[in-house]
Image (spheres, grey):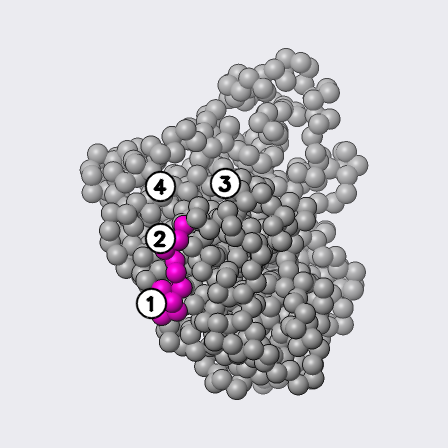
Amino acid sequence: MYGAILGDMIGSPYEFDRGEKIKAFPLFIETSRFTDDTVMTVAVADALLYAGIDAEEKKICTAVVSSMQHWGEKYPNAGYGGKFREWLKEKVPKPYGSFGNGSAMRVSPVGWLYDSIERTREVARWTAEVTHNHPEGIKGAESVASAIYLARTGESKETIQKYIEEEFGYNLTRTLKEIRPAYRMDVTCQGSVPEAMIAFLESTDFEDAVRNAVSIGGDTDTTACIAGSIAEAYYGLTPTLEKECLERIPEKMKSVLCHFDRVRGEEIQGEPIIEAALRRYRKDESTENMAAVLDAIYMRMKDGGSFLLPPSEVQRFDAYVERGDYDSAISIEAYTSDSEFFMGLDEEDENANYITEVKIYDLLSFIAKATDAETGIDINYAKNFYLNRDMAKSILAKGEENAAHLRGLYLPMLDTISISPKDLSPKFISGVRFCFMCTYDVYYNNYCELYHRNGKIYRYDISGNHKNVKKICQVFPALKKFNESGGQNGKLEEWEWNYYELGAWVFAHAEVKKAYKMRTGHTDYLTWSPYDAYMTIQDLLEEEDMAFTPMSIHADAIRTMSDYQHDREGIPAGWIYLGNDYERYVLGQPGERNILVLGVNPSTAKPGDDDPTIRSVRRIAENKGYDGWIMMNLHPQRTPHPEEMEDNPIWSENNPMAVKAVMRAFHIHAVWCAWGNMIDMTGKRFLYSALAKIYDVLGDYVKWYNYGNLTKDGNPRHPLYMSLTDEFQKFDVPGYLWRKGM
């Protein structure tokens, strides 16, 4: 479905032959926008979710009509055809015998939702017949939905082409080179659907399919929408394009897409490009499809992609790397997504709480150095693929020219890393594309702060006598030049201070590592504390008279903070805490059996300083058999006046990551929804979006509960004033979000 929307937006500026019929055009420009193709695609998805996956014809048709009229009223100027615009306004709308491509452009949700091609075609026909009850209109919808189904289930292009030609009679043997010169605006199914399919068949990846469709001209938004919908199912999408799609559509559309993903059991996170290639390879273990898998892995390695590793594999991998042991024959177990990982687990398997992202480049680099040819990576549970040493070498060789960019390629806002001294190399640093701050020797309060911007390294301040820092300065010409020019004078004025929010990297040398290990006892690697980094950032911001910027979240810090945080920050033993005067992500007293509590937002409570809500949470949790509780919220902004909450995008992104880290760190299997009617009283609709994002992260991997009966407004009750005789009840989060208009 994302592919259909992206195709619509990319193709929209060139509709009516406004383009030059070439493939070399900017993917997104100022006039790139969604049109009626996107609106009606979302409408069909919304209708199918409402009707239910097993619904019969009458219920689905009624839901589709109602949903399309609702979304059409919401976006009346999206570019509808004349007859369809009239249909949208009718009190009792009837089909009008259309064979326009509207039935095909909106059908992509059907291709993703059902488990058989028979059911896919059946529902596709129903979604078409409410308006496009002409045989060609129905054929257009069925054919596109069928192509999507075949593509997402791993069938080859040859199989897809043969099925479409035999079942629907479309001629797919023509080439784009033959079509392009004479092709003009054609909004019929028979005059645009085959062309869109040929654009997909001739493509090499998703982007190429969309460019193919736009390059023939005509109804470019719709042909690109159709081609994109099939291409997404076949190739998968990069995280960058998925993000681009979500950022360019309104919040309510975004909510439908996220709900649709949850119903399908899919996560937006993961490596869909690799998974799509693996599906095709498992259907046909040909040399060509194997090459496609390796190409997909290379593509994601180049873009900074990661595999997920269970804790045992992380420990083995780290141990081998630490020792430099390349002589043993080992097999590393890795996964492309949470859903793949969880397929092989029992419900209560505690390993689920500790899966860790490891850069594809790092894994392949290790495997490639092995002396034993059988050493490799066993990828996935359901569609496992063994990537051996020679394959790893071939992927790395292909990307050798980009090797400098393959370590720490992106510094996400929500994550940082810990590194050892041996990783401090020009190649490593030159690969970092985002601005960052490096804090050196946190424990002695003597630090070197390095800033990376536009390929240059800047030094802000150096305290103490650190020989390693001086060596670093000598390694990087830009930094050395900066030092020689007199330090911060002049150069730092170029710095954009709002980039501080992107986080911090900690440089550790041998003395710091030794001191840290003596102090904490748990690692040779210096682990970054977000609290320390935040304070450093905040001090600098205050020094420059800048506004407050929320902290960045580091999952490893959450995972380990219970081990040492009370020693470092004066927090009572047994408590965990991540927050400050402006925000609070985590507060709790974890035990062996923990429950995660979700409120609206934090107020005044701190470790050892309870408020009435915390006392009620502790009392109820203990009574129901939980010896540990962890309080989090839909929104981390700290205020006793929830109506004052601000919809800050950093908080919006940080909070779900913090929830996920806590779940994994403390073996959480139960979530207590406890925000009460305050969620409605605040008038802050972004709180529902916040819940949807948290659910996207946790999904059905945990049990969701409310305590006692729901309020009259359908909200889970707040812990205050609840009786110990009440019981936890299952809470339907997707249904709740649906009822709240999300």
Report which residue position mark 2 lands on.
277
3 or 1: mark nearer the eye: 1
First in residue order: circle 2 vs circle 1: 1
The C terminus lies in which quarter of the figure?
Answer: bottom right
2 or 1: mark nearer the eye: 1
| Residue at the image position 72 percent from the left and 64 percent from the top | 77
First in residue order: circle 2 vs circle 3: 2
Report which residue position mark 4 lands on.
363
Instruction: Give x and y (percent) for residue 712.
Output: 69, 84
Callout 1: 10 Å neighbours few (<14), some, many (20+)? few
Residue 590 magenta: no
Count of residue discs? 4
Per the model, the C-alpha gap separating discs 2 and 1 is 25 Å
Label 2 SS: helix
First in residue order: circle 1 vs circle 4: 1
Q: Is residue 678 left or right of residue 597?
A: right
| Residue at the image position 27 percent from the left and 40 percent from the top | 391
Label 3 SS: loop
Q: Which residues are magenta?
A: 163-175
- Regarding residue 259, the answer to whether it shows in the image is no
2 or 4: mark nearer the eye: 2
Q: Which mark is residue 417?
A: 3
Q: Nearer the viewer, residue 258 or 296?
A: 296
- Three-letter amino acid code at disc 1? Glu
Instruction: Give x and y (percent) for residue 73.
Output: 71, 72
Q: Is residue 428 above or below residue 295?
A: above
